[in-house]
Image (cartoon, grey):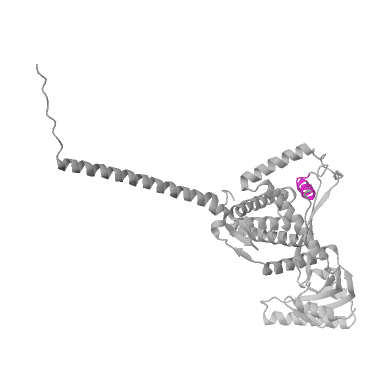
Amino acid sequence: MAKRERAVKEPTKKQTALNRRERELQRRVLIGVGITGALVVIVLAVGLLQQLVLIPNSPVATVNGDTITTDRYQARVKYERALLVNQLAQYQQIQQQLDPNGSNNFFGSQIQQLQQQLSNPETLALNVLDNMVDEALIRQEAAKRNITVDPADVEKEVAKSFGYEPDATPTPIVTPATITSTQVVTTSAGVTETQVVSATVTPAPTPTPFTEAEYQRIYKETLDNISKSSGVTEAEFRTLTENRLLRTKLQDVVTADVPTTEEEIHARHILVKVAATATAEEKQKADEKIKAALERLKKGEPFDVVAKEVSEDSSAAQGGDLGWFGKGRMVAEFEDAAFKLEVNQISDIVTTQFGYHIIQVTEKDPARKLDDSTLASKKQQAFADFLTKLREASKIERSWNTSKIPPTPIGG
């Protein structure tokens, strides 16, 4: 049987044109998809570049041309936050052991202060930036003055911070020890004084110093934890130690000419308090009380006896004795009156924001040697003034905003 053949029709011109248009449309669609894909890849690449390179390396501040980058700043904020968390935990542990009833205000105030710092991430972040700016200024100023830190001193200080001091002579502690801390307060006489807060504990004997191998293990473990939690590298950790040593060296140079003596007087006073909200009647009673005290002194009664009976200041138990003090320690009205008195002279009534005073100077010394605490305080103030002038003379540009603050971990 003969095979049937089917005639194949040639496409018409219209069909050919339609086919051509379909192929062109498909080609354009493919090109569009390709372009869109390329754009997506570019956008993603730009985003990654922005997140991984541009933002981390963007300046949060420049100090005389030296840049503080965002990534290093954020790592430092995380590190400082972790230090505060650790300090808080330590104070809470000490309070629990030594002062479970919370009767010692020192521990409570320290804990409250640390909690406040941690509860305000913006203030903490700004403080960190201020510190980093100061560190840059100190490095620059130290370089100008050829002040350097020996790497061996950095190593020694780092090891010391971990409790590893191979050259130190260990002294076992077997008797009760006293933990002390100082806090500056202003008395009702306007006197700024340092009070010592103490707590006695009986610790175990000092353990045998650990070996260098153990120190290296603890050092590596700690630095690994710091790097993972904050991003602070080992080099940055050691630079922080170097910065502290540089600051001390620069401060020693800057404050070398701070006077070690000053004019001081030894005085005592009687205070009758007058509150800012006191009524006219209350003021009148206070006025009569201080005038009566002055009359007793004029009649020859001992100052300390009248002070113990009349004065409403904490110094009354000591006969009103305020000890030795120099200028700048008292409120202005009190200081002006006191430094004009001769030895053993009794003042008229002096009015200050605290109330009514009667002052007597018992000793004067035009060049009294400063105690270690006062001298250290004056040197710190002199260096703070130096840093203020250094900041004012420097070109400091800040690019800080709240987006620069790293996220706070869950739980603080």
Numbered disc total: 0
Q: Is residue 249 left or right of residue 393?
A: right
- Residue 284 falls in image quadrant: bottom right
Q: Residue 234 location in percent, x, y? A: 68, 46
- Residue 25 falls in image quadrant: top left
Q: Residue at (40%, 49%) from the top-left corner? A: 39
Q: Residue 182 location in percent, x, y? A: 78, 59
Q: Which residues are magenta?
A: 152-163
- Residue 123 falls in image quadrant: bottom right
Q: Residue at (45%, 48%) from the top-left corner? A: 44
Quadrant of the rendering where the N terminus is positioned: top left
Q: Residue at (30%, 46%) from the top-left corner? A: 28
Q: Main secondary structure of the magenta part?
A: helix
Foreground residue among 17 and 68: 17
Instruction: Using the image, determine if residue 367 lies above or below residue 34.
Output: below
Instruction: Using the image, determine if residue 181 lies above or below residue 206.
Output: below
In the image, residue 36 lies in the stretch drawn in magenta: no
Q: Is residue 87 left or right of residue 367?
A: left
Q: Is residue 4 left or right of residue 217?
A: left
- Asked whether residue 100 is in view, the answer is no
In the image, residue 159 lies in the stretch drawn in magenta: yes
Q: Residue 48 location in percent, x, y? A: 50, 48
Q: Residue 383 location in percent, x, y? A: 76, 65
- Asked whether residue 395 is in view, the answer is yes
